[in-house]
Amino acid sequence: MKTSNAAATAIQVVVSKMMDRVLERVLIEDPFIKESHHANKPLYAALVPDEIFKGSHFERRFVTPFGGVWEKLAVVAAKQTHGHCEKGCAIAGNVGEERLRRIQEVLNKLEHAQSSSSRQSPKWTAELSYVLAGQGKPIPVTVVCDIFVHNPTSGKRYAFELKGPLPNSDQTKVSKEKIFKLLAMSPIQVDGAFYALPYNPYGSKKVDYKWTFPMRWFDMHNDPCVLIGNEFWDFIGGTGTYDAFISEVNSLGKTYRERIYREYLGIEPPNMSNDYLLK
């Protein structure tokens, strides 16, 4: 897949629009009014500086438009490269009754220790082979995936369970079950199904990942169905998308953080050369 600077540019446009909308809201439509805060919460105002609550006011109005931000960014990146992408896509097909039973068997062994041994460790390739070896009566199954990508040119279709970088155990279990079902459908409805994290908070390599909860269900360092950071973005947006995306976001961050200091907090921004950067 070739480099797609267009995907990174499309991501930049989405982030810029979302940030501009947040600033419009906190500066014009719903600003923090000190006098109202003092009148409504006199005890809080007497004990805590206004700036703390002004920050909370901003945070609440920031979180809503940025809800599901990774999915939104994935859609615009994938459309640039593959042509079609949607979130919350329902994929329907038939899965053999024995395959469904084996999926639950695999998940149960990963979740619970067996009487004669300890809880099993995830081994994706062996697990999937075991599931697909089952047959049985076809059962209608519908799976709603987080991200669905279709490339009309190649005809390839891909499904992704896209979670935050620190997912919990329960949501990871649900994602693994959905991926199993997608790949067990007959006839095949997707060419690949993946468990994806938008970035790695622990380092640049897959082996650096340390969050333990999803490791109960996937070998996060080795499973081919697991995509973390650059693996995911370059897959959906083309080689180089992740690096270009990171560069664009950090550039935008400097601009918007300076604006927030000056226009919202009313103070000059500090030296931010060593501040946090997305990596």
Image (cartoon, rainbow, N blue to C red):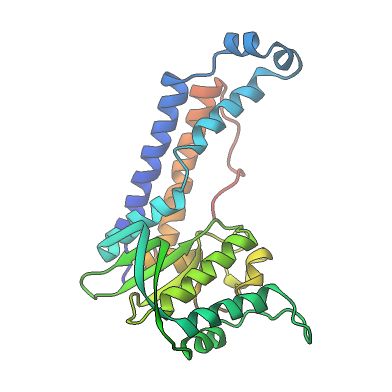
Residue 93, quarter of picture: bottom left
Task: Please give the count of numbered marks on the rendered protein.
Answer: 0
Residue 237 appears anywhere in the view: no
Q: In this view, does 167 lie to the left or right of 27?
A: right
Residue 95, quarter of picture: bottom left
114 w.r.t. 258: above or below: below
Q: Which residue lies furthest to the front in this view?
A: 137
Q: Which percent across, then down, holds residue 91?
A: 35, 67
Seen at 66% across and 25% down, the residue is 52
Which residue is nearer to you in this view: 173 or 231? 173
Q: Is residue 212 left or right of residue 28?
A: right
Seen at 63% across and 66% down, the residue is 214
248 w.r.t. 46: above or below: below
Q: Which percent across, then down, holds residue 196?
A: 49, 65
Which residue is nearer to you in this view: 2 or 34? 34
Seen at 67% across and 66% down, the residue is 210
Q: Which quarter of the image is occupied by the C terminus?
A: bottom right
Q: Which percent across, then down, holds residue 84?
A: 27, 61
Q: Which quarter of the image is occupied by the N terminus?
A: bottom left
Q: Which percent across, then down, holds residue 158?
A: 36, 70
51 w.r.t. 245: above or below: above
Q: Which residue lies furthest to the left in this view?
A: 153
Residue 189 appears anywhere in the view: yes
Which residue is nearer to you in this view: 18 or 114? 114
